[in-house]
Image: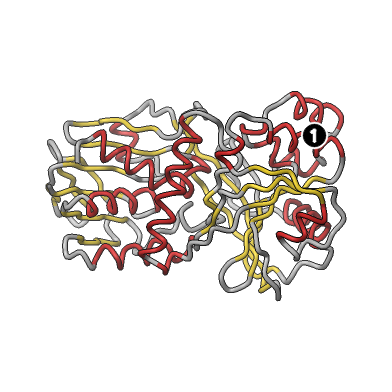
Amino acid sequence: MRVIVVGAGVLGTMHAWQAIERGHEVVHIERETEARGASVRNFGQIWVSGRAGGEELTTALRARELWEGIGARVPGIGFRAIGSLTVVKNPAERAVAEAATRRPDAAARGYKLLDADEARAVNPALRGDFLGALWCERDAAVEPRVAQPALRQALLASGRYTFLGGREVREVVGERSVRDDHGDVHEGDAVVLCTGAWLGGLVRELVPDLPVRRVRLQMMQTDPLGEPLTTSVADADSFRYYPAYASEALDALAAEQPQTPTAAAHKMQLLMVQRLDGGLTIGDTHEYETPFGFDVVEDPYEHLTGVVESILGRPLPTVRRRWAGVYAQCVDTSRVVHRQRVREGVWLVTGPGGRGMTCSPAIAEDTANELGW
């Protein structure tokens, strides 16, 4: 079988990976010379801890398993099974963490409630003032800026993979074929469109009423910390954002402890992970109303700096990069992904939202199974 994959972000790359793993030939087309969207503008977290139960958790856990296997074969992606700590600073936040440990699926996630000393034993870089932390053993991380190139090198080694960068697919031609902006037609037995947050042009023509929206975020990266940050780190605002933490305790937290004005205005949480070079990737904000601003604003960065310094108990290293990114999310946020046949033999797969880096290997596996690869 010859599979045409459009889009070389993490979701498209994982679809190419599945096709090659199953013995097929792949032509992979990307409008940029390298992926430049949400797949490289993220934390690189394989984030099981906050996922909703049911299909979303099943998908995340399967993806976590697949990521570990891929990481063993492609060391260049920088897979690390580091887990995460969600830090709590008062009894109300601790109550939400404790409620999470009573979920029926808590063991599958690897939840454990730690006191401050236990949390510091897991991650000695946390020297700030806090009450404890929710540990999630199943969380992991990869290096988002290098994962796709590393995976592509592994795919090229198969001899059945062709990468065409700098080509924008403009048209679906008949069945199972596409035409790019060089005028070339690429024919296959199946076409999978993984165009990420690019929802205009060809995608709008194919699906005018696509139930997917775009979300904008802001993030930053620092100089090396100078010591290991042995886990990913989140703050209690993440309880408000991720569905796994819904509980009466969370309702009580929301009622008695509103977010700071900056965090509320920008729909913020702290997520932080250390890169292999020692720097910290820190975020993030969420903006849902379009048109999005073209610039980044400073207040969220000041808020995040204060939160991080309170947890680390030390000044944040110098910030070297700030950026914004946009990802595609299903309007029905309970859906893991939008997968739709848009023409005979042509499928659109988009909208995993902030789950893209986490869930992409399992989403691609599901596509391959559904299409009978």
> SS for tag 1?
helix
371 is higher (above) or lower (below) than 280? above
Q: Residue at x 80, y 57 (%)?
A: 311
Q: Which residue is drawn at 65% across and 58% down?
A: 231
Amino acid at pointer 1: Ala
Q: Which of 83 and 181 lies nearest the eye of the viewer?
A: 83
The percent position of residue 97, horizontal first and vertical second, equals 74, 38
Q: Which of 47 and 264 lies nearest the eye of the viewer?
A: 47
Name the residue beneath numbered marker 1: 95
91 is higher (above) or lower (below) than 5? above
In the picture provided, is 22 more to the left or to the right than 266?
left
The percent position of residue 177, horizontal first and vertical second, equals 15, 43
Q: Quadrant of the C terminus?
A: top left
In the picture provided, is 315 more to the left or to the right than 292?
right
Label 1 environment density (alpha carbons within 10 Å; few <14, some 14–19, many ≥20): some
239 is higher (above) or lower (below) than 274? above
The percent position of residue 158, horizontal first and vertical second, equals 20, 64
In the picture provided, is 295 more to the left or to the right than 164?
right
